Image (cartoon, rainbow, N blue to C red):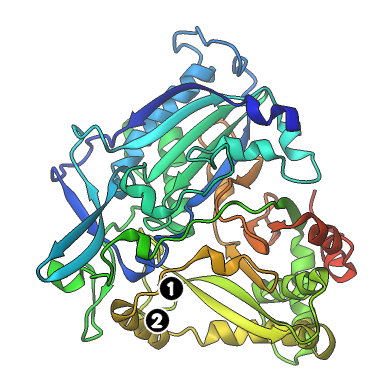
Amino acid sequence: MSEATGLVRCLSRCTIKPYPIHQQEKQQTYHLTPWDLSLISTHGIQFGLLFAKPPSTSSALSVDDAGGQNHYSSGAIVNQLKHSLSRTLAHFLPLSGRLVTNKQNDPPSYSISIECNDENNSSQGVEFIHAAAPVTLNDILSPHFVPPIVRSFFTLHEPDDGSMLMVNHDGHTTPLLSVQVTELVDGYFIGCSVNHAVADGTSFWNFFNAWAEICRGKENSEDLISRRPILERWFLKENQEEVDNPDENSIIINLPFSHHDEFLGRYPPPCLIEKIFHISGQSMSQLKQKANNECLTNKISNFQALAALIWRSLTRARGLHAEQETNFKICINDRKRLNPQLSEDYFGCYLNLVMGKAKARDLLISQNIGSTALILHEAIANHTDEYVRCWLKKWKTEPDIYNLGSHYDDCSMVIGGSPRFNPYGCDFGWGKPLAVRSGWAFKFNGIVWMTPGRLGGGSVDLEICLSPEVMSALESDKEFMDAISTHDA
């Protein structure tokens, strides 16, 4: 596979504009919230789906000359993806815009927003790349580790020279959404790169599912989607009253900076490997039961039990000193922490982090999976509506912009994603995806991405990113491997 890494070749590149389905203003501005701005210095979201090629599709490496007559020809599929993407963008307008910084000297102010200009603005829109690679589905699915070529299935990829990676602030000059459709010998990979200051995982997969829904829909219903996004950002007023479309001057967040170099951090990509671990629904249920039995409660969820297992296993695999304090961070959806809750259809970034802390000896000697899970349960339970509102209010006066450099250590672990996402519902009209894979973004030592398993039934897939030596130790960890020994194929 290493020989194939550089063999992804671009066949065409174009810009996709939102289809004028709805009557829209020539320019729309979406002001960024504290949730959005907190991620301005991190990487974007990069996930893609692997599909088998329909039997009648022509070779990925040949020129399609069917003249559009074959619905499943390579050319027809790519054209349909472009057409349906344009219509989907009409519902998800912020993805076609760019970030804009507004600075004033008197009084001093520095704010960032998303601006979506009319379709005649050549600098905006979504990047769409049609590429090809001489690899098979089996080349992607069968290796022990995620093959490096997968990273080349995404646009806005890491520099060839291994220098600093792009961050969300680069959305001032680069697309907020970039799509690469890579034809394989016997399949397709659709990779999406989305600016994380514009959308979180919930919004990302809502968009992906809406695109698939429009693509497979009938001609007279192609503009209809079952879940329409709510594009207005949700803000908190000083008097703690939430509003969807408040007075502009009351919601613009003035950052205490004069230049972006004051808050941006860029880091070279670490040398890591990734592996996908499959955990069956049965194993998940057994973990939950074990955790609850060990701490004499029924409060521990499947997710918390699995997170506790990962925390303990990675701490052991890293060989940390007994007195070393470790932390386990969980990406949490604040839509569901507010009271009243926000709809999952609110488009944007509503992510926060909760964190459990413990010394290595406490995790591995004094505690079991149940007591470890209880630490995480309490951290999540304490992330209340009151906490979120206080965090939002404080952020306006004391901005806290996440810096990925703080995660590049051997004592931290982060889990993102959710078993509630629906990647396998993204049927573009030629069948269910075979697998979910991620790109180069957000790859640091100890990051874990969770997605639902393809076979359902409560199964989950974990993409774990570690140094080679720690990955080897993890795969020798009996407690961890016992949990995945009955995994779904």
Residue 358 sits above or below residue 117 on the image: below
Circle 1 packing at 10 Å, graded few (<14), some (14-19), many (20+), is many
Residue 302 sits above or below residue 181 on the image: below
| Residue 234, image x, y percentages | 29, 69
Task: Report the residue at 73% width, 83% height from top.
Answer: 324
| Residue 463, image x, y percentages | 68, 55
Residue 432 in view of the camera = no
N-terminal label among 1 and 2: 1
Is residue 145 or residue 49 the one in the foreground?
145
| Residue 73, image x, y percentages | 53, 17
In the drawing, does residue 232 fall left or right of residue 75? Answer: left
Residue 130 in view of the camera = yes
In the drawing, does residue 221 fall left or right of residue 422? Answer: left
Q: Amino acid at mark 1?
A: Asp
Identify residue for label 1: 334
Residue 438 sits above or below residue 30 on the image: above
In the drawing, does residue 481 fall left or right of residue 376? Answer: right
Is residue 366 or residue 306 the one in the foreground?
366
Is residue 325 or residue 250 the one in the foreground?
325
Pointer 1 and pointer 2: residues touching (CB < 8 Å)? yes
Identify residue for label 2: 388
In the drawing, does residue 406 fall left or right of residue 168? Answer: right
Task: Report the residue at 18% width, 32% height from top.
Answer: 120
Task: Report the residue at 31% width, 37% height from top.
Answer: 125
SS for tag 1?
helix
Q: CA distance from mark 1 to mark 2?
A: 7 Å
Residue 475 sits above or below residue 309 on the image: above
Residue 335, picture quadrant: bottom left
Q: Amino acid at mark 2?
A: Val
Circle 2 packing at 10 Å, graded few (<14), some (14-19), many (20+), is some
SS for tag 2?
helix
